[in-house]
Amino acid sequence: MSSRSDVQSDTFDAFFRESKKPLLAMAFVLTGDLATAQDLSQEALLRTWVRWSRVAKFDDPQAWTRRVLYNLAVSKSRGDRVRQQAPRVEPRSTPAPSESHLMLAAALRSLPEDQVRALVLHDGAGHSIAEVATEMKVPEGTVKSWLSRGRAAAAKAMDSSESTAKEGHASF
Amino acid sequence: MPHSEEQVQELLREMYSTAESNDWDVDAAELRSQRGRRDVPLPDVKVLVLVAAAVILVVVGIVVAHGSASHRSTASGPTTTPSTAAAATVVTVPNATNQTLSEATSALNMAGLTVTVTNVVNNEAAGLVLNQNPAAGLQVSRGSAVSLTVSSGPSNVRVPSLIGLSQTQATNVLGQAGLNVGNIVSVPSNNFAANVVVQSSPGAGASVLPGSSVDVVVSSGPPPPSG
């Protein structure tokens, strides 16, 4: 016989296992730094666990966690102090961030969350348009639109951030 | 050189595989155990507990200090204040009047006084304290005597001689002796004028309780001529 909290733990652990990789990928493309990505993913998952009794009842619990993660990444890059409850990842355990990754991450943070997710699923993970459409519960046309607009905006943002970086203003 | 959309796609693929190959090793149970650990600002709770403890300690300290201070002032002999020294040798006389002798004696002894008793015959119940000297409320030296006047109860009185007295005179005489007039019976008498007491019951000299009634026989004058 398992208590209510045991059931909660079990369902969360299943959610954790299936959400871990997509969340980390999302976090990484939004931050460009693995240590930060892991910190933010853990934080988003912990905040999910804290509210798990409610979040578990959502149609798509991972969407909630992803929204938290996106907000955390954007807030952190703005320099907002993110109150982190999850234990911090030891930075030396992860590879040093590359400049191009940091630049793309900064560009992606200027995009809406849906566009970022579509880019991660299609361009990153290699899913087909149809699979992304099913996954995101939107028509394929919408996915195509998000992808092209997202890429264009990201490329443009990288251009401007590169010129800013050349003037000596590092981002992130 | 402007970035192309192809470069964005390329970088995204690269970053995704980097993320995929760098799975972080925190497991769900470990993460769950973090819940609430820094949820509540613990320092604040600690501060509250410490403040509460400090307040309790201060209050207890004040109470203890106050208690021991008052204890010292009553317990130390040589440095006793004048008022408390007087209390040791001067006592207030308690009330003893209208109590039984045993009650009064107990109260006086507890106040540190001795008792001298004077019994008097009285209509009050035997053992009742009728009077005391010195009076209640006076300050006297500890160990001094209080004189109590105690009823030994009513004593018998002798029925006075009433024969030859008028009914009015007899009533007065009985009253002076502490006796009451009881039934009055009229009888003819050749020897006594009308309304003169010819007999009493109990008779003269009898010992009776104070307040007793004495029946009297009164002459109604000579009997009417017969025949």
Image (tube, rainbow, N blue to C red):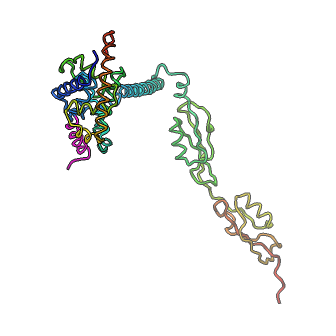
- Nearer to us in this view, A145 or A66: A145
Q: Which residues are magenta?
A: A1-19
Query: In this orientation, does residue A87 appear?
Result: no
Return the x and y of residue B142 as percentages of the image width and height. Answer: 54, 31
Return the x and y of residue A128 as percentages of the image width and height. Answer: 21, 37
The answer to which quarter of the image holds residue A143 is top left
- Nearer to us in this view, B119 or A71: A71
- Nearer to us in this view, B191 or B223: B223
**Residue at horizontal 23%, vertical 26%?**
B9
Return the x and y of residue A73 as percentages of the image width and height. Answer: 31, 26
Position of the N terminus of chain B by quadrant:
top left
Helix, strand or loop for the magenta stretch, by majority? helix
Check the image and report above or below for A165 versus B227. Answer: above
**Residue at horizontal 26%, vertical 28%?**
A27
The answer to which quarter of the image holds residue B2 is top left
- Nearer to us in this view, A5 or A121: A121
Going by the image, does B201 lie left or right of A73?
Answer: right
Query: In this orientation, does residue A54 appear?
Result: yes
Going by the image, does A154 lie left or right of A17?
Answer: right
Position of the C terminus of chain B by quadrant:
bottom right
